[in-house]
Protein backbone atom coordinates (compact mmCIF):
# COMPACT_ATOMS: atom_id res chain seq x y z
CA UNK A 1 0.00 0.00 0.00
CA UNK A 2 1.53 3.32 -0.97
CA UNK A 3 0.58 6.79 0.07
CA UNK A 4 0.57 9.24 -2.80
CA UNK A 5 0.03 12.95 -3.06
CA UNK A 6 -1.75 14.78 -5.89
CA UNK A 7 1.29 14.57 -8.20
CA UNK A 8 1.36 10.78 -7.75
CA UNK A 9 4.55 10.80 -5.68
CA UNK A 10 4.88 8.95 -2.41
CA UNK A 11 5.19 11.10 0.68
CA UNK A 12 8.60 11.81 2.17
CA UNK A 13 9.20 11.25 5.88
CA UNK A 14 12.18 12.72 7.73
CA UNK A 15 13.57 10.32 10.35
CA UNK A 16 16.32 11.40 12.76
CA UNK A 17 17.96 9.23 15.43
CA UNK A 18 21.57 8.96 16.58
CA UNK A 19 21.23 5.21 17.22
CA UNK A 20 21.98 3.48 13.86
CA UNK A 21 19.91 0.39 14.79
CA UNK A 22 16.82 2.47 15.66
CA UNK A 23 17.31 4.60 12.53
CA UNK A 24 17.39 1.45 10.35
CA UNK A 25 14.35 -0.02 12.15
CA UNK A 26 12.23 3.12 11.79
CA UNK A 27 13.34 3.57 8.16
CA UNK A 28 12.31 -0.04 7.36
CA UNK A 29 8.90 0.31 9.06
CA UNK A 30 8.17 3.65 7.36
CA UNK A 31 9.26 2.37 3.93
CA UNK A 32 6.97 -0.66 4.32
CA UNK A 33 4.14 1.87 4.75
CA UNK A 34 4.97 3.13 1.25
CA UNK A 35 6.88 6.31 2.12
CA UNK A 36 10.25 7.55 0.96
CA UNK A 37 12.54 8.10 3.95
CA UNK A 38 15.16 10.80 4.35
CA UNK A 39 17.28 9.82 7.34
CA UNK A 40 19.54 11.89 9.58
CA UNK A 41 22.01 10.57 12.17
CA UNK A 42 21.79 13.63 14.41
CA UNK A 43 19.96 16.90 14.90
CA UNK A 44 22.33 18.88 12.68
CA UNK A 45 21.73 16.58 9.68
CA UNK A 46 17.97 16.77 10.28
CA UNK A 47 18.15 20.59 10.45
CA UNK A 48 19.99 20.70 7.09
CA UNK A 49 17.35 18.43 5.52
CA UNK A 50 14.57 20.67 6.88
CA UNK A 51 16.29 23.69 5.31
CA UNK A 52 16.76 21.93 1.95
CA UNK A 53 13.28 22.83 0.71
CA UNK A 54 12.29 19.15 0.55
CA UNK A 55 8.57 18.63 1.20
CA UNK A 56 7.94 16.24 4.08
CA UNK A 57 4.62 14.56 4.94
CA UNK A 58 5.80 13.94 8.52
CA UNK A 59 8.89 13.67 10.70
CA UNK A 60 10.03 11.19 13.36
CA UNK A 61 12.69 12.55 15.74
CA UNK A 62 14.57 11.08 18.66
CA UNK A 63 14.31 13.49 21.60
CA UNK A 64 17.96 13.18 22.67
CA UNK A 65 20.44 13.65 19.79
CA UNK A 66 23.86 15.24 19.37
CA UNK A 67 24.16 18.89 18.26
CA UNK A 68 20.43 19.69 18.14
CA UNK A 69 17.80 17.99 20.32
CA UNK A 70 14.57 16.74 18.78
CA UNK A 71 12.49 19.27 20.71
CA UNK A 72 14.69 22.10 19.38
CA UNK A 73 14.04 20.86 15.82
CA UNK A 74 10.29 20.92 16.46
CA UNK A 75 10.50 24.48 17.85
CA UNK A 76 12.46 25.53 14.75
CA UNK A 77 9.81 23.92 12.51
CA UNK A 78 7.04 25.79 14.35
CA UNK A 79 8.79 29.09 13.56
CA UNK A 80 9.00 28.40 9.80
CA UNK A 81 5.86 28.88 7.68
CA UNK A 82 6.74 26.06 5.23
CA UNK A 83 7.51 23.58 8.07
CA UNK A 84 4.96 24.40 10.78
CA UNK A 85 2.24 22.08 9.43
CA UNK A 86 4.44 18.96 9.22
CA UNK A 87 3.30 16.52 11.93
CA UNK A 88 6.17 15.35 14.16
CA UNK A 89 6.37 12.12 16.17
CA UNK A 90 8.91 12.24 19.00
CA UNK A 91 10.49 9.08 20.40
CA UNK A 92 12.85 8.36 23.27
CA UNK A 93 14.18 5.62 25.50
CA UNK A 94 14.55 8.10 28.38
CA UNK A 95 12.18 7.49 31.28
CA UNK A 96 11.78 11.18 32.17
CA UNK A 97 8.05 12.12 31.95
CA UNK A 98 9.00 15.77 31.30
CA UNK A 99 10.33 14.79 27.87
CA UNK A 100 6.84 13.97 26.57
CA UNK A 101 5.33 17.21 27.91
CA UNK A 102 8.32 19.18 26.52
CA UNK A 103 7.80 17.48 23.14
CA UNK A 104 4.11 18.38 23.03
CA UNK A 105 4.70 21.95 24.16
CA UNK A 106 7.34 22.31 21.41
CA UNK A 107 4.71 21.27 18.85
CA UNK A 108 5.02 17.50 18.41
CA UNK A 109 1.73 15.70 17.70
CA UNK A 110 2.71 12.27 19.06
CA UNK A 111 5.16 10.71 21.51
CA UNK A 112 6.48 7.16 21.24
CA UNK A 113 8.46 5.61 24.12
CA UNK A 114 11.23 3.18 23.12
CA UNK A 115 11.10 0.26 22.81
CA UNK A 116 8.04 0.37 20.57
CA UNK A 117 6.40 -2.17 18.30
CA UNK A 118 6.10 -1.94 14.53
CA UNK A 119 2.33 -1.69 14.94
CA UNK A 120 2.63 1.25 17.36
CA UNK A 121 4.82 3.23 14.96
CA UNK A 122 2.61 2.40 11.96
CA UNK A 123 -0.55 3.49 13.81
CA UNK A 124 1.04 6.74 14.97
CA UNK A 125 2.37 7.51 11.51
CA UNK A 126 -1.04 6.92 9.89
CA UNK A 127 -2.74 9.06 12.53
CA UNK A 128 -0.25 11.91 12.05
CA UNK A 129 -0.34 11.88 8.24
CA UNK A 130 -4.13 11.84 8.11
CA UNK A 131 -4.46 14.56 10.75
CA UNK A 132 -2.00 16.74 8.82
CA UNK A 133 -4.03 16.64 5.60
Image (spheres, rainbow, N blue to C red):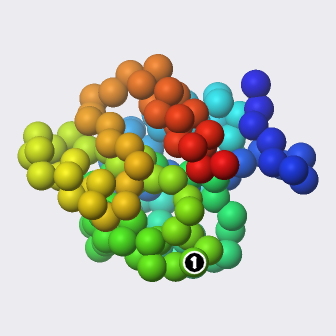
Left or right placement of residue 92 versus residue 3 in this view = left
> What is the tally of numbered marks visible in this picture?
1
Percent of width and height locating residue 120: 42, 25
Percent of width and height locating residue 32: 64, 28
Q: Closer to the camera, 65 or 77?
A: 77
Q: Closer to the camera, 39 or 11?
A: 11
Q: Does residue 20 appear in the picture of this structure? A: no
**Residue at (26, 44) in percent of width and height:** 92
Left or right placement of residue 114 versus residue 4 in this view = left
Q: Quadrant of the N terminus?
A: top right
Crowd rating for badge 1 (residues with CA inside 10 Å; few <14, some 14–19, many 20+): few
The image shows residue 96, relative to residue 33, as above or below, that is: below
Q: Does residue 9 appear in the picture of this structure? A: yes
The image shows residue 114, relative to residue 80, as above or below, that is: above
Percent of width and height locating residue 19: 33, 47
Left or right placement of residue 2 versus residue 92 in this view = right
Quadrant of the rendered image containing residue 71: bottom left
Label 1's element?
Answer: loop
Left or right placement of residue 64 versus residue 5 in this view = left
**Residue at (47, 33) in percent of width and height:** 124
Percent of width and height locating residue 27: 54, 40
What residue sits right under mark 1 in the picture?
A: 81
**Residue at (32, 42) in percent of width and height:** 111
**Residue at (39, 39) in percent of width and height:** 21
Amino acid sequence: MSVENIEGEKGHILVADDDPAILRLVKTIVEKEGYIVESARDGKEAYKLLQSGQKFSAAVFDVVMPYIQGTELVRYMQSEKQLMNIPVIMMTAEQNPRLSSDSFSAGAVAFLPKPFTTTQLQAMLRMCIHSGQ
